[in-house]
Amino acid sequence: MDLAFLHPLYEHSGPWASVYVDTSRHAEDTPHELHLTAQAMARDLGEQGADDATCRAVREAIEELRHSPDPHGRALFARAGEVVLDPVLAHRPQGSRAVWAPLPRVAPLLDLAGEDPVAIVAYVDRRGADFELRSALGRQKAGAVVGRQYPVHRTSSVDWSERHFQLKVENTWEHNAAEIADALAVCQDETRADLLVLVGDDRERREVRERLPKRLHDRVVDSAHGTGSRLLDDEVEQVRAEHVRGRIAAELDRFRAARTPDDGGRAGAAEGVPALVEAAREHRLEELLVRPDGPDTHREVWIGEDPDQLAVRRTDLKILGEQHSWSARADDALIRSAVATDAAVLSLAPVLEGTQDDIPAGGLGALLRWK
Protein backbone atom coordinates (compact mmCIF):
# COMPACT_ATOMS: atom_id res chain seq x y z
CA MET A 1 0.00 0.00 0.00
CA ASP A 2 1.28 3.44 -0.94
CA LEU A 3 0.96 5.60 2.18
CA ALA A 4 2.27 8.84 0.70
CA PHE A 5 -1.06 10.48 1.59
CA LEU A 6 -0.06 10.18 5.26
CA HIS A 7 2.83 12.66 4.93
CA PRO A 8 0.78 15.54 6.47
CA LEU A 9 0.54 13.54 9.70
CA TYR A 10 4.29 13.49 10.13
CA GLU A 11 4.88 17.17 9.44
CA HIS A 12 3.66 18.01 12.96
CA SER A 13 4.53 16.69 16.37
CA GLY A 14 1.99 14.92 18.59
CA PRO A 15 0.13 13.95 20.54
CA TRP A 16 -2.56 12.86 18.10
CA ALA A 17 -6.20 11.90 18.20
CA SER A 18 -6.90 8.93 15.92
CA VAL A 19 -10.57 8.07 15.45
CA TYR A 20 -12.19 5.35 13.34
CA VAL A 21 -15.89 5.89 12.72
CA ASP A 22 -18.29 3.21 11.48
CA THR A 23 -20.75 4.81 9.02
CA SER A 24 -22.01 1.62 7.39
CA ARG A 25 -25.50 1.87 8.87
CA HIS A 26 -27.79 4.10 6.82
CA ALA A 27 -31.25 4.73 8.23
CA GLU A 28 -33.56 7.57 9.27
CA ASP A 29 -31.88 7.82 12.66
CA THR A 30 -28.33 7.89 11.22
CA PRO A 31 -27.82 11.61 12.06
CA HIS A 32 -28.77 10.91 15.67
CA GLU A 33 -26.48 7.87 15.79
CA LEU A 34 -23.60 9.98 14.47
CA HIS A 35 -24.36 12.63 17.07
CA LEU A 36 -24.09 10.03 19.83
CA THR A 37 -20.89 8.65 18.28
CA ALA A 38 -19.40 12.14 18.10
CA GLN A 39 -20.09 12.72 21.78
CA ALA A 40 -18.71 9.31 22.77
CA MET A 41 -15.49 9.70 20.75
CA ALA A 42 -14.87 13.20 22.14
CA ARG A 43 -15.50 11.95 25.65
CA ASP A 44 -13.12 8.99 25.19
CA LEU A 45 -10.37 11.29 23.92
CA GLY A 46 -10.88 13.66 26.84
CA GLU A 47 -10.57 10.80 29.31
CA GLN A 48 -7.29 9.80 27.64
CA GLY A 49 -5.89 13.32 28.10
CA ALA A 50 -6.73 15.06 24.82
CA ASP A 51 -7.10 18.84 24.91
CA ASP A 52 -10.56 20.39 24.65
CA ALA A 53 -9.92 22.01 21.25
CA THR A 54 -8.99 18.69 19.63
CA CYS A 55 -11.95 16.92 21.23
CA ARG A 56 -14.23 19.62 19.86
CA ALA A 57 -12.70 19.38 16.35
CA VAL A 58 -13.24 15.62 16.29
CA ARG A 59 -16.80 15.92 17.56
CA GLU A 60 -17.69 18.50 14.90
CA ALA A 61 -16.05 16.45 12.12
CA ILE A 62 -18.08 13.36 13.03
CA GLU A 63 -21.28 15.44 13.18
CA GLU A 64 -20.54 16.67 9.63
CA LEU A 65 -20.52 13.11 8.31
CA ARG A 66 -24.31 13.12 8.44
CA HIS A 67 -24.33 15.27 5.27
CA SER A 68 -22.34 12.74 3.23
CA PRO A 69 -22.40 9.37 4.96
CA ASP A 70 -19.62 7.13 3.69
CA PRO A 71 -20.52 3.54 2.73
CA HIS A 72 -18.13 1.99 5.26
CA GLY A 73 -16.47 4.49 7.55
CA ARG A 74 -14.05 7.35 8.01
CA ALA A 75 -10.76 7.83 9.84
CA LEU A 76 -9.98 11.15 11.53
CA PHE A 77 -6.53 12.31 12.63
CA ALA A 78 -6.47 15.50 14.68
CA ARG A 79 -4.09 17.58 16.81
CA ALA A 80 -4.04 21.08 18.31
CA GLY A 81 -7.72 21.64 17.61
CA GLU A 82 -7.58 20.68 13.92
CA VAL A 83 -8.48 17.61 11.87
CA VAL A 84 -5.41 17.20 9.65
CA LEU A 85 -6.52 14.16 7.64
CA ASP A 86 -9.81 12.29 7.21
CA PRO A 87 -9.49 9.40 4.70
CA VAL A 88 -12.56 7.43 3.63
CA LEU A 89 -12.42 3.76 4.58
CA ALA A 90 -12.84 1.00 2.00
CA HIS A 91 -13.98 -1.51 4.63
CA ARG A 92 -16.16 -1.29 7.71
CA PRO A 93 -14.28 -0.91 11.01
CA GLN A 94 -15.27 -3.10 13.94
CA GLY A 95 -17.11 -0.33 15.72
CA SER A 96 -16.02 3.26 16.30
CA ARG A 97 -12.98 3.88 18.49
CA ALA A 98 -10.65 6.71 19.50
CA VAL A 99 -6.99 6.77 20.61
CA TRP A 100 -4.87 9.61 22.02
CA ALA A 101 -1.15 8.85 21.56
CA PRO A 102 2.22 10.41 20.61
CA LEU A 103 1.86 9.04 17.05
CA PRO A 104 -1.20 8.76 14.81
CA ARG A 105 -2.73 5.29 15.07
CA VAL A 106 -2.45 4.51 11.35
CA ALA A 107 -1.82 0.73 11.33
CA PRO A 108 -5.58 -0.10 11.06
CA LEU A 109 -5.64 1.76 7.74
CA LEU A 110 -3.68 -1.08 6.16
CA ASP A 111 -6.79 -3.27 6.30
CA LEU A 112 -9.52 -0.63 6.37
CA ALA A 113 -8.33 1.63 3.55
CA GLY A 114 -5.59 -0.27 1.75
CA GLU A 115 -5.36 -2.86 -1.02
CA ASP A 116 -8.58 -1.79 -2.71
CA PRO A 117 -8.06 -2.75 -6.37
CA VAL A 118 -10.07 -0.81 -8.92
CA ALA A 119 -11.80 -2.84 -11.62
CA ILE A 120 -13.27 -1.75 -14.93
CA VAL A 121 -16.22 -3.98 -15.78
CA ALA A 122 -16.80 -3.94 -19.56
CA TYR A 123 -20.24 -5.17 -20.65
CA VAL A 124 -19.48 -6.23 -24.22
CA ASP A 125 -21.77 -7.11 -27.11
CA ARG A 126 -21.50 -6.95 -30.88
CA ARG A 127 -22.69 -3.36 -31.08
CA GLY A 128 -20.40 -1.84 -28.46
CA ALA A 129 -19.73 -1.79 -24.73
CA ASP A 130 -20.55 -0.02 -21.47
CA PHE A 131 -17.78 0.52 -18.92
CA GLU A 132 -18.29 0.61 -15.17
CA LEU A 133 -15.68 1.47 -12.54
CA ARG A 134 -15.89 -0.71 -9.43
CA SER A 135 -14.15 -0.41 -6.06
CA ALA A 136 -15.01 -0.96 -2.41
CA LEU A 137 -16.60 2.50 -2.41
CA GLY A 138 -19.18 1.54 -5.03
CA ARG A 139 -19.66 1.78 -8.77
CA GLN A 140 -19.76 4.57 -11.32
CA LYS A 141 -20.15 4.81 -15.07
CA ALA A 142 -16.84 5.01 -16.90
CA GLY A 143 -17.91 5.50 -20.51
CA ALA A 144 -19.35 3.62 -23.45
CA VAL A 145 -18.45 2.57 -26.97
CA VAL A 146 -20.96 2.59 -29.81
CA GLY A 147 -19.64 0.61 -32.73
CA ARG A 148 -21.03 -0.03 -36.18
CA GLN A 149 -24.63 -1.10 -35.89
CA TYR A 150 -25.13 -2.95 -39.21
CA PRO A 151 -24.73 -5.74 -40.06
CA VAL A 152 -24.02 -7.61 -36.81
CA HIS A 153 -25.95 -10.87 -37.21
CA ARG A 154 -25.21 -13.83 -39.42
CA THR A 155 -27.94 -15.24 -41.63
CA SER A 156 -28.98 -18.86 -41.40
CA SER A 157 -28.74 -19.28 -45.17
CA VAL A 158 -26.13 -21.58 -46.68
CA ASP A 159 -26.53 -19.99 -50.12
CA TRP A 160 -23.12 -19.01 -51.54
CA SER A 161 -24.65 -15.65 -52.50
CA GLU A 162 -24.72 -14.81 -48.80
CA ARG A 163 -20.91 -15.02 -48.39
CA HIS A 164 -20.50 -11.32 -49.14
CA PHE A 165 -23.01 -10.44 -46.42
CA GLN A 166 -21.34 -12.81 -43.94
CA LEU A 167 -17.98 -11.17 -44.62
CA LYS A 168 -19.50 -7.78 -43.80
CA VAL A 169 -20.76 -9.22 -40.50
CA GLU A 170 -17.27 -10.45 -39.67
CA ASN A 171 -15.79 -7.06 -40.53
CA THR A 172 -18.35 -5.30 -38.32
CA TRP A 173 -17.53 -7.55 -35.35
CA GLU A 174 -13.81 -7.06 -35.78
CA HIS A 175 -14.18 -3.29 -36.16
CA ASN A 176 -16.33 -3.01 -33.03
CA ALA A 177 -14.01 -5.26 -31.00
CA ALA A 178 -11.04 -3.10 -31.97
CA GLU A 179 -12.85 0.08 -30.94
CA ILE A 180 -13.88 -1.45 -27.61
CA ALA A 181 -10.32 -2.62 -26.93
CA ASP A 182 -8.88 0.81 -27.76
CA ALA A 183 -11.39 2.59 -25.53
CA LEU A 184 -10.82 0.08 -22.70
CA ALA A 185 -7.05 0.65 -22.88
CA VAL A 186 -7.57 4.42 -22.68
CA CYS A 187 -9.97 4.03 -19.75
CA GLN A 188 -7.46 1.86 -17.89
CA ASP A 189 -4.69 4.36 -18.52
CA GLU A 190 -6.82 7.23 -17.19
CA THR A 191 -8.14 5.40 -14.12
CA ARG A 192 -5.05 3.24 -13.42
CA ALA A 193 -7.44 0.33 -12.89
CA ASP A 194 -5.89 -2.88 -11.59
CA LEU A 195 -8.34 -5.25 -13.28
CA LEU A 196 -10.40 -5.47 -16.47
CA VAL A 197 -13.47 -7.70 -16.17
CA LEU A 198 -14.99 -8.62 -19.56
CA VAL A 199 -18.68 -9.58 -19.50
CA GLY A 200 -20.39 -11.08 -22.55
CA ASP A 201 -20.44 -14.07 -24.86
CA ASP A 202 -17.29 -16.13 -25.31
CA ARG A 203 -16.53 -14.90 -28.83
CA GLU A 204 -17.17 -11.23 -28.03
CA ARG A 205 -14.88 -11.37 -25.00
CA ARG A 206 -12.18 -13.18 -26.95
CA GLU A 207 -12.29 -10.67 -29.83
CA VAL A 208 -11.82 -7.78 -27.43
CA ARG A 209 -9.17 -9.48 -25.31
CA GLU A 210 -7.02 -10.35 -28.34
CA ARG A 211 -6.98 -6.70 -29.40
CA LEU A 212 -5.93 -5.26 -26.05
CA PRO A 213 -2.30 -4.13 -25.61
CA LYS A 214 -0.07 -6.91 -24.29
CA ARG A 215 0.64 -4.88 -21.14
CA LEU A 216 -3.00 -5.39 -20.11
CA HIS A 217 -3.36 -9.11 -20.82
CA ASP A 218 -2.49 -10.19 -17.27
CA ARG A 219 -5.14 -7.81 -15.87
CA VAL A 220 -8.06 -9.37 -17.80
CA VAL A 221 -10.64 -11.59 -16.12
CA ASP A 222 -13.55 -13.14 -18.06
CA SER A 223 -17.14 -13.47 -16.92
CA ALA A 224 -19.98 -15.07 -18.84
CA HIS A 225 -22.70 -13.44 -16.74
CA GLY A 226 -24.85 -10.80 -18.32
CA THR A 227 -25.53 -7.18 -17.51
CA GLY A 228 -27.46 -6.64 -14.29
CA SER A 229 -26.78 -10.11 -12.93
CA ARG A 230 -26.74 -10.03 -9.15
CA LEU A 231 -24.21 -12.84 -9.23
CA LEU A 232 -21.85 -10.54 -11.12
CA ASP A 233 -21.64 -8.20 -8.10
CA ASP A 234 -20.39 -11.09 -5.99
CA GLU A 235 -18.10 -12.26 -8.76
CA VAL A 236 -16.45 -8.85 -9.12
CA GLU A 237 -15.81 -8.76 -5.38
CA GLN A 238 -14.32 -12.25 -5.57
CA VAL A 239 -12.06 -11.21 -8.45
CA ARG A 240 -10.87 -8.15 -6.54
CA ALA A 241 -10.21 -10.21 -3.40
CA GLU A 242 -8.27 -12.84 -5.36
CA HIS A 243 -6.16 -10.10 -6.93
CA VAL A 244 -5.27 -8.77 -3.48
CA ARG A 245 -4.41 -12.22 -2.15
CA GLY A 246 -2.26 -12.98 -5.17
CA ARG A 247 -0.26 -9.78 -4.84
CA ILE A 248 0.30 -10.27 -1.09
CA ALA A 249 1.29 -13.93 -1.57
CA ALA A 250 3.86 -12.87 -4.17
CA GLU A 251 5.40 -10.32 -1.79
CA LEU A 252 5.44 -12.89 0.99
CA ASP A 253 7.31 -15.28 -1.31
CA ARG A 254 9.83 -12.50 -2.00
CA PHE A 255 10.28 -12.04 1.74
CA ARG A 256 10.84 -15.75 2.35
CA ALA A 257 13.45 -15.90 -0.41
CA ALA A 258 15.17 -12.73 0.79
CA ARG A 259 15.77 -14.20 4.25
CA THR A 260 18.69 -16.18 2.82
CA PRO A 261 21.91 -14.11 2.90
CA ASP A 262 23.69 -13.40 -0.38
CA ASP A 263 27.33 -14.19 -1.13
CA GLY A 264 28.33 -11.12 0.84
CA GLY A 265 26.45 -12.33 3.91
CA ARG A 266 23.70 -9.72 3.62
CA ALA A 267 20.06 -10.76 3.85
CA GLY A 268 17.43 -8.90 1.86
CA ALA A 269 14.83 -9.25 4.60
CA ALA A 270 14.57 -8.56 8.32
CA GLU A 271 12.05 -9.49 11.00
CA GLY A 272 11.60 -8.79 14.67
CA VAL A 273 11.50 -5.36 16.28
CA PRO A 274 15.24 -4.88 17.01
CA ALA A 275 16.29 -5.67 13.42
CA LEU A 276 13.52 -3.53 11.94
CA VAL A 277 14.30 -0.57 14.19
CA GLU A 278 17.92 -0.71 13.07
CA ALA A 279 16.90 -0.91 9.39
CA ALA A 280 14.48 2.01 9.81
CA ARG A 281 17.18 4.18 11.44
CA GLU A 282 19.43 3.47 8.45
CA HIS A 283 16.66 4.16 5.89
CA ARG A 284 16.82 0.60 4.55
CA LEU A 285 13.11 -0.28 4.57
CA GLU A 286 11.86 -1.09 1.07
CA GLU A 287 8.54 -2.68 2.06
CA LEU A 288 7.21 -3.16 5.57
CA LEU A 289 5.12 -6.31 6.10
CA VAL A 290 2.59 -6.27 8.94
CA ARG A 291 0.47 -9.03 10.34
CA PRO A 292 -2.06 -7.04 12.44
CA ASP A 293 -2.57 -9.78 15.04
CA GLY A 294 1.17 -10.31 15.57
CA PRO A 295 2.44 -9.84 19.15
CA ASP A 296 5.21 -7.44 18.12
CA THR A 297 2.84 -4.92 16.52
CA HIS A 298 1.90 -3.41 19.88
CA ARG A 299 5.34 -3.83 21.43
CA GLU A 300 6.68 -0.62 22.99
CA VAL A 301 9.48 1.25 21.22
CA TRP A 302 10.84 4.73 21.80
CA ILE A 303 10.64 7.57 19.30
CA GLY A 304 12.06 11.05 18.87
CA GLU A 305 10.73 13.95 16.86
CA ASP A 306 12.09 12.68 13.52
CA PRO A 307 10.97 9.43 11.81
CA ASP A 308 14.46 7.89 11.96
CA GLN A 309 14.77 8.57 15.67
CA LEU A 310 13.52 5.32 17.16
CA ALA A 311 14.96 2.68 19.42
CA VAL A 312 14.04 -0.42 21.35
CA ARG A 313 15.12 1.20 24.64
CA ARG A 314 14.82 4.79 25.77
CA THR A 315 18.50 4.90 26.74
CA ASP A 316 19.43 4.03 23.15
CA LEU A 317 17.84 7.28 21.96
CA LYS A 318 19.81 9.28 24.50
CA ILE A 319 23.01 7.64 23.29
CA LEU A 320 22.06 8.75 19.78
CA GLY A 321 21.76 12.32 21.05
CA GLU A 322 17.98 12.63 21.17
CA GLN A 323 16.90 14.70 24.17
CA HIS A 324 13.12 14.18 23.86
CA SER A 325 11.50 10.77 23.57
CA TRP A 326 8.10 9.14 23.82
CA SER A 327 6.87 5.55 23.88
CA ALA A 328 4.87 4.32 20.89
CA ARG A 329 3.55 1.14 19.32
CA ALA A 330 6.11 -0.61 17.12
CA ASP A 331 3.80 -0.85 14.10
CA ASP A 332 2.92 2.86 14.09
CA ALA A 333 6.55 3.91 14.67
CA LEU A 334 7.81 1.72 11.82
CA ILE A 335 5.04 2.90 9.50
CA ARG A 336 6.08 6.51 10.20
CA SER A 337 9.66 5.62 9.19
CA ALA A 338 8.41 3.80 6.07
CA VAL A 339 6.31 6.77 4.95
CA ALA A 340 9.19 9.19 5.51
CA THR A 341 11.49 7.12 3.27
CA ASP A 342 8.84 6.32 0.61
CA ALA A 343 8.76 2.63 1.50
CA ALA A 344 5.64 0.56 0.82
CA VAL A 345 3.63 -1.01 3.64
CA LEU A 346 1.59 -4.18 3.26
CA SER A 347 -0.84 -6.00 5.55
CA LEU A 348 -0.57 -9.79 5.43
CA ALA A 349 -4.02 -10.31 6.96
CA PRO A 350 -5.75 -11.48 3.72
CA VAL A 351 -3.38 -14.45 3.36
CA LEU A 352 -2.32 -15.21 6.96
CA GLU A 353 -5.36 -14.36 9.07
CA GLY A 354 -6.58 -17.40 10.97
CA THR A 355 -3.50 -19.50 10.18
CA GLN A 356 -0.68 -20.66 12.43
CA ASP A 357 1.96 -19.26 10.07
CA ASP A 358 4.41 -17.18 12.12
CA ILE A 359 5.92 -15.36 9.13
CA PRO A 360 7.22 -12.80 9.73
CA ALA A 361 8.35 -13.52 13.28
CA GLY A 362 6.28 -11.52 15.74
CA GLY A 363 4.09 -10.14 12.95
CA LEU A 364 6.55 -7.51 11.64
CA GLY A 365 9.04 -7.93 8.82
CA ALA A 366 10.51 -6.02 5.90
CA LEU A 367 12.16 -6.34 2.54
CA LEU A 368 15.31 -4.25 2.65
CA ARG A 369 17.09 -1.91 0.31
CA TRP A 370 20.87 -1.71 0.34
CA LYS A 371 22.79 1.34 -0.78
Image: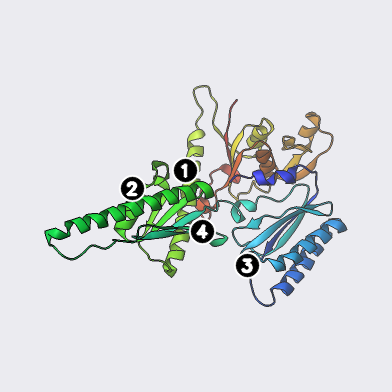
* Of pointers 4 and 2, the one earlier in the residue sequence: 4
Task: Identify residue for label 4.
Answer: 134
Task: Measure the alpha-carbon separation of dots 4 and 2.
Answer: 23 Å
Task: Identify residue for label 3.
Answer: 24
Front: mark 3 or 2: 2
* 138 displayed left or right of 17: left
Counting from the top left corner in percent of width and height, residue 246 is at 46, 48
Q: In percent of the image, x 81 and y 64: which residue is there?
A: 43
* Of pointers 3 and 4, the one earlier in the residue sequence: 3
Q: Image height check: is 160 above or below 360?
A: below
* Of pointers 2 and 1, the one earlier in the residue sequence: 2
Task: Measure the alpha-carbon separation of dots 1 and 4.
Answer: 24 Å
Front: mark 2 or 1: 2
* Local secondary structure at mark 4: strand
Give the residue type at disc 4.
Arg
Q: Mark 1 Cα within 10 Å, few/some/many (few <14, many 20+)? A: few
Task: Identify residue for label 2.
Answer: 210
Task: Identify residue for label 1.
Answer: 250
Give the residue type at disc 3.
Ser
From the viewer's side, name the closer residue of 276 and 23: 23
